[in-house]
Structures are given as C-alpha cells and as structure tokens.
Image (cartoon, grey):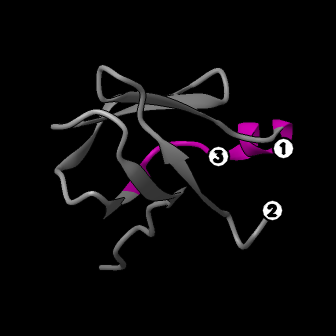
Amino acid sequence: MNGGAYHGEVWTDGNGFATVRLPAEAGLLEPPLEYELRDLEPSSSARVTAELEDGRFTIATDQPHVKVAWRISRRKEERK
C-alpha cells in the first residue's frame, strides 16, 4: 500500500465511463475516502459516479474516450 493511497490512469469508453479496479489489498481502505481526478486528454470534466465498493469505483467524463488520472486515499481527519 502506497501510504494508504492508490493511483493510476484509465481511458473512458464510448459512453464516457470507466471502472477502476484496485488491487486486493485496497480492501483495507475505509471511509472517509478522498478521490482526485484529472482529465489528461482531451480536456473534459471527470467525476466519480460510483464510490469504492468491492474494490472498484466508476468515473464519468463529459466526452467519450478521455484519459483520466485518478488517485484514491483515506481522507485525513481534522484534529480539534
């Protein structure tokens, strides 16, 4: 585990959706989770449409066939 974070790149399909599958040890990630998405090419708007469940989550873009860089990690809790 990379300090509790996983990252990679994925291409969306013809409908603008992609499912990201994490390695088995990612099952250790528990909410709250933080998702970071950055569209690489072509420019689009990426968003999470289904949060992490059974080791995978789904993203969508406004256009089809967009390369998206993603990162998921456990959100750090603020100290009071």
The number of numbered badges drawn on the structure is 3
Tell me which corner region of the image, top left, top right, bottom left or bottom right, holds residue 5: bottom right
User: Whole-Å distance between the Cαs marked 2 and 1?
Assistant: 7 Å
Secondary structure, mark 1, is: helix
Q: What is the spatial separation of the Cα atoms under label 3 and label 1, in whole angstroms?
A: 8 Å
- Provide the residue designation for mark 1: 25
Q: Are marks 2 and 1 in contact (CB under 8 Å)?
A: yes
50 in magenta:
no
Q: Residue at x 42, y 52 (%)?
A: 67
Q: Going 35% across and 23% down the picture, which residue do you hit?
A: 14
In the image, what residue type sits under mark 2?
Met
The crowd level at tag 2 (other Cα within 10 Å; few <14, some 14-19, many 20+) is few
At horizontal 58% and vertical 43% (from top left) the residue drawn is: 30
Q: Which residue is mark 3?
A: 29
In the picture, measured across the screen, residue 54 lies left or right of residue 19, that is: right
The amino acid sitting under disc 3 is Leu
Name the residue type under label 1.
Answer: Glu
Look at the image and say whether residue 34 sits in the magenta stretch: yes
Q: Position of residue 52 (x, y in %)?
A: 51, 32
The mark nearer the N terminus, 3 or 2, is 2
Residue 51 in view here: no
Task: For mark 2, give the secondary structure.
Answer: loop
Q: Which mark is residue 37?
A: none
Q: CA distance from mark 3 to mark 2?
A: 10 Å
Give the residue displayed 30% in from the left and 20% down from the top: 15
